[in-house]
Image (spheres, helix red, strand yellow):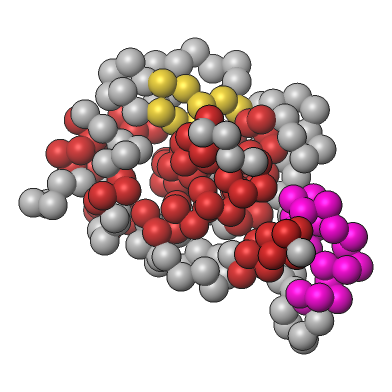
Amino acid sequence: MQALTLARACALLGARPTTITKVTGLDRYEVVSLLFSEPGSRKPGQNPSSPEWFFGKACLLDHLDASLFMVMFDRLVGLGVRYPDALVTGYRQYRALRGNPDADGEGTGNVRLTFDRAFDLTRHTYGIWGVLKPSFMVANCAVCRSRYLTALSSRTGTAECCFCKLVVRFGSNDRIRESFQGCSRSSLNGVIISRLASIFSVDR
């Protein structure tokens, strides 16, 4: 019953059957028959299976959203939460932070990171769910004191920190400013501190 409850939670957040199977350990046929029996309930396309999208195609906003989610996931795991529960809870927190708390499928509004991509990030950061060797890590920025997602082989610093880049571009980039309108300030302050807190203050 616990696995089925978890599977339903993943499905409501937009997960594909393959993702649900890996997270819950349930049989794929069982997942499909229980959760995706209605016409049109299964999304087209393939699951992300490589970190290359993050390295090559992701823009700054993608890196920001990936970091926001992974910092939440990493904090929950550090508190002793199991990986599957941390994935679901962390993704819900991420969606609420980005102004879309409804658990009714993948991103609308400011939500750029789908559940399947969030799942893929956790695999390649922790080396879990079929990934043997991590490609990412959650690093600490010495300048803005934020935690952010970066390549495991990267030299951590201002040049790599997506939040430092956000500070530089926020005042002159309309797309970035619009993307963070309506964010939950109370949740955000737990993730982004120091210089970033003034950008997302209530007075803005």
Q: What residue is rendered at 20% in x and 30% in y?
A: 195
Q: Quadrant of residue 106?
A: bottom right
Note whether 37 is above or below 22 in the view shown: below
Q: Quadrant of the N terminus?
A: bottom right
Q: Is residue 84 left or right of residue 165?
A: right
The answer to whether residue 40 is above or below residue 68 is: below
Magenta span: 17-36
The residue positioned 63% from the left and 64% from the top of the image is 9
x then y, percent, for residue 78: 53, 30
Q: Is residue 80 left or right of residue 3?
A: left
Residue 145 in view: yes
Image point 56% across, 25% down: which residue? Answer: 137
Q: Name the side, left or right, on which 66 lies relative to 157.
A: right
Q: Is residue 32 left or right of residue 193?
A: right
Q: Main secondary structure of the magenta part?
A: helix
Residue positioned 45% across, 16% down in the render: 156
Asked if residue 143 lies in the magenta stretch, the reply is: no
Out of 188 and 48, give the one closest to the viewer.
188
Res. 43 image quadrant? bottom right
Q: Is residue 31 magenta?
A: yes
Residue 145, quarter of picture: top left
In front of the other: 4 or 200: 4
Q: Residue furthest bottom?
A: 39
Question: In the image as oriented, which residue stretches furthest toward the front?
Answer: 1
Question: Looking at the image, how many numbered discs can be counted on the residues?
Answer: 0
Q: Locate residue 153, reporting x and y percent.
A: 60, 16
> Percent x, y for residue 72?
47, 41
Can residue 57 be seen in this snapshot?
A: no
Outermost left residue: 203
